[in-house]
Image (cartoon, coloured by chain):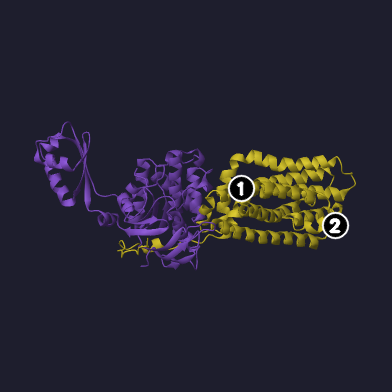
Chain colours: A yellow, B purple
Amino acid sequence: MSNVRTPPVTARPATPAAAATPGPKVSLSAGIVAVAAGQFGRVRVARGPLLFVATVQSLGLVVLLRGVVHHHDKATAAAIVAGASILVVAFVALNLLAQRLGALKASTALDYYAALPISPAAVVLGTAASYAAFAGPGVVVTALVGALVYGLSLSWLWVVIPAAAAAALALSGVGALLGLLLPRPELATIAGQLAMTLVLFLGIIPVGHLPEVVRGLRLAVPGMLSVDAVVDVIRPHPDWTDVVARLAASLGYGVVVLGLAGAAMRRAVDR
Amino acid sequence: MAPAYLVRGVSKSYRGSATPANVDIDLEVPTGEIFGLLGPNGAGKTTLVRQLAGLVAPDAGSITLLGHDLAADRRMAARLVGYLGQDEPALAELGVHRAVETTARLRGAPRRVAAAMASELVDELGLAAVADRPLVRCSGGQRRLACVASALAANRPVLILDEPTTGLDPVARRSVWAAIRRRRAEFGTTVLLVTHNVIEADSVLDRVAVLDAGRVIACDTPGRLKAAVDDSVRVVLVWQTEPPYDDTTVEALARRAVIDGRRWTIRLARDESRDLLDRLTRAPLFDALDDFTVATPSLEDVYLSLGGTRTDLERT
């Protein structure tokens, strides 16, 4: 059966010129805010459990390991507190975000976002930001409780906030990649859990205690640069150039994986 | 003025599928038209509109949207088109008003403007009573209506609506069509509608493209399509009791009718049907009738005559 050509048509009465004007481009920041606002409305119904689960896991580890770490071993204490603090972000970004984006991909929900004038990065970051609202207090509480339990000074505490933010970018990017690239949402959930476990082990175990081969690969794991930056500042007389370099590298890591996540989202829509 | 859509030679296949989803499709949709894509499930309608909405790129061919070549800038579609997919789980956990407001904000409307738009749309589509209810807790019809409201948010010059009235009751359907017609009248909005409901297609569309197996097999106004395939008229008579056989008209009709109890169905040429209607509407025949209907061929008849199969076409 051959295709037919459209017969000549008569246009309707003149369209108001303004009606054919493209809508505005939505900037990355405005897109993130709008996506986050919508997603926040979605996740706030579960805010209690989310806040509790994201925090209690890390707090539990901090308290549990206090029983096996010698009081004078400040290097191990620093690794535990820094790792446990970033683990709160990992729980949200890797576990929940991979799960959420995997579910969006499995349904046709990505079409909704793809048909809007926002960048894929805004969808990933906006969704992550809505969860981060719950992770933020958990990071601060974990770091504070850790400092008190292990007798660390509190002067470094503010660094946890930029470190967690930089880690959030990297971890969100990887969480989004898992959700968008894996063929089924169940696989995305499992992969997110495994990645979180990796962050837990490699973040909390002091670098010096790791085998040489693992030590080399460790920096490829998202969030580790942020963990190291926090560990650096807990030490007496931190090298601030090192700290800033680590945070910048963590940020750069995040930007790269978020770019990849954006490409993965376009690929998921173009199915 | 550039047409809303100029589609030339568009083809699309999916990886792992033996048959192409769209084959060499040509369409021209002028601005301000309500244009329909009709066909059964699997005909390629959704694939075509996803390309028109800039969600996927065609394997071959070109799509020009209001003068913009989508091959050069696929994202331009997002700034010109309000798209409603078959389902919208992205918004499911939001309240109705919040879902519409969020969509308006994501289309670039400032927060206050978006909130005002959402309130207007919620009222216009009769959703005020469930404005704060999360979509997941709304009925299927209310949820669909909320998604239509989201598609209408921020007044895009082109609307692509993939089965917008599925699951809606007649009152809600009317409110959707009233909202769409209002936008066409006030803003010259172009509407592309995917449906497999032939009654809706018949009554709402200016023009319709009939798709089958990924190809456009016909494209014209519903009236011209129907006239092209069959010039006959279907007359259904329902008698109150025994038909008055002593009347010569009834006696002649009885020889041509398919009789099912008191219900007679007769196919007549248009001229014959006019003559018959003239006689039927006078006593004593009119007094003997309980009901009668006169129907021209439907789009379903068009679709079937063009080689389509009956599967999946709705007549509700």
Is A257 left or right of A212, judged from the image as shown? Answer: left
Between B139 and B260, the residue placed more toward the observer is B260
Q: Position of residue B174 (x, y in %)?
A: 34, 45
Total labels: the figure holds 2
Which residue bears the numbered disc 1? A185
Which residue bears the numbered disc 2? A212
Where residue A268 sits, quadrant-wise, is bottom right
Q: Position of residue A210 (x, y in %)?
A: 84, 53
Q: Kindly identify the residue that appears in the image at 11 percent across and 43 percent down.
A: B279
Q: Secondary structure at mark 2?
A: helix
Disc on the earlier residue, 2 or 1: 1
Callout 1 amino acid = Pro
Position of the C terminus of chain A, as image quadrant, is: bottom right
* Numbered label attached to residue A213: none
Query: In the figure, B61 relative to B292: above or below?
Result: below
Between B184 and B117, the residue placed more toward the observer is B184
Callout 2 amino acid = Glu
Where residue A151 sits, quadrant-wise, is top right
Q: Position of residue A238 (x, y in %)?
A: 83, 58
Q: Chain of mark 1?
A: A
Is B227 left or right of B109, judged from the image as shown? Answer: left
The CA span between labels 2 and 1 is 35 Å
Tags 2 and 1 both on a single chain: yes
Is B78 left or right of B288, judged from the image as shown? Answer: right
Q: Mark 2 touching mark 1, by CB under 8 A?
A: no
Q: Residues within 10 Å of mark 1 (few under 14, many from 20)?
A: many
Q: Is residue B281 visible?
A: no
Q: Kindly identify the residue that appears in the image at 42 percent across and 66 percent down.
A: B9
Q: Chain of mark 2?
A: A
Between B17 and B211, the residue placed more toward the observer is B17
